[in-house]
Image (tube, helix red, strand yellow):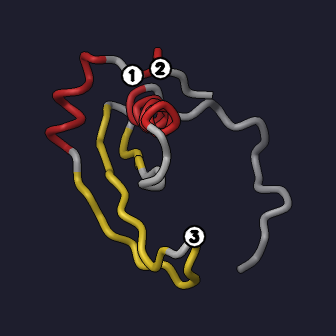
Amino acid sequence: MATHADLDPGHLAEALATLRVVRVPMRVPFRGLREREVALLRGARGWAEFGPFLDYPPAEARLWLAAAFKAAYAGWPAPVRDREIGRAHV
């Protein structure tokens, strides 16, 4: 789980330079929303997204941001299996 410690201030300028905000329409409204706005940022390990709901308090939204930084700068852990299991077909 991402923590506040994952928000490395050294990456802030780089993240802000690559930051892109996108609006994504939703097929099914959720919590009264018909679209979501998310921020995309690029780090050393690739792109990540940050998109908490606007009514989230800062402490909770900060955890979402920490997770985005972790994905962009630390990357994902190695897979534990070599194939998908139980994938739902949509």
Tell me the distance, in whole angstroms, between the alpha carbons under discs 1 and 2: 6 Å
* Image side of residue 28 versus residue 35, left or right: right
Mark 3 / mark 1, whichever is N-terminal: 1
Neighbor class of circle 3 (other Cα within 10 Å; few <14, some 14-19, many 20+) is few
The relative height of residue 66 versus residue 90 in the rendered view (above or below) is above
Marks 2 and 3, the one that precedes in the sequence: 2
User: Which of labels 2 and 3 is toward the front?
Assistant: 3
Residue 83 x, y percent position in the rendering: 77, 52
**Which is in the foreground here, disc 3 or disc 1?**
3
Q: Position of residue 19 (x, y in %)?
A: 22, 46
* Category of crowding for the residue at label 1, using alpha-carbon neighbours closer than 10 angstroms: few (below 14), some (14–19), many (at least 20): some
Q: Which residue is mark 1?
A: 7
In the rendering, which numbered label is found on residue 4?
Answer: 2
Q: Dividing the picture into quarters, in which one does residue 46 lie?
A: top left
Kindly check if marks 1 and 2 are in contact, taking CB atoms under 8 A apart as contact. yes
Asked whether the residues under the numbered discs 2 and 3 touch, taking CB atoms below 8 Å apart as contact, a structural biologist would say: no
Q: Secondary structure at mark 1?
A: loop
Query: Closer to the camera, 59 or 83?
Result: 59
75 vs 53, nearest the viewer: 53
| Residue behind mark 3 | 31
Report the amino acid beneath label 2: His
Residue 23's label in the rendered image is none
Q: How many C-alpha atoms fall within 10 Å of the one at disc 2: few (<14), some, or many (≥20)?
A: few
Residue in view at x 48 percent, y 74 percent: 33
Give the residue drawn at x 76%, y 35%: 80
Q: Look at the image and tell me in which quarter the C terminus lies.
A: bottom right
Instruction: Report the amino acid beneath label 3.
Output: Arg
Above or below — where is 45 with respect to 27? above
Q: Quadrant of residue 73?
A: top left
Amino acid under disc 1 = Leu
What secondary structure is found at the residue carrying circle 3? loop
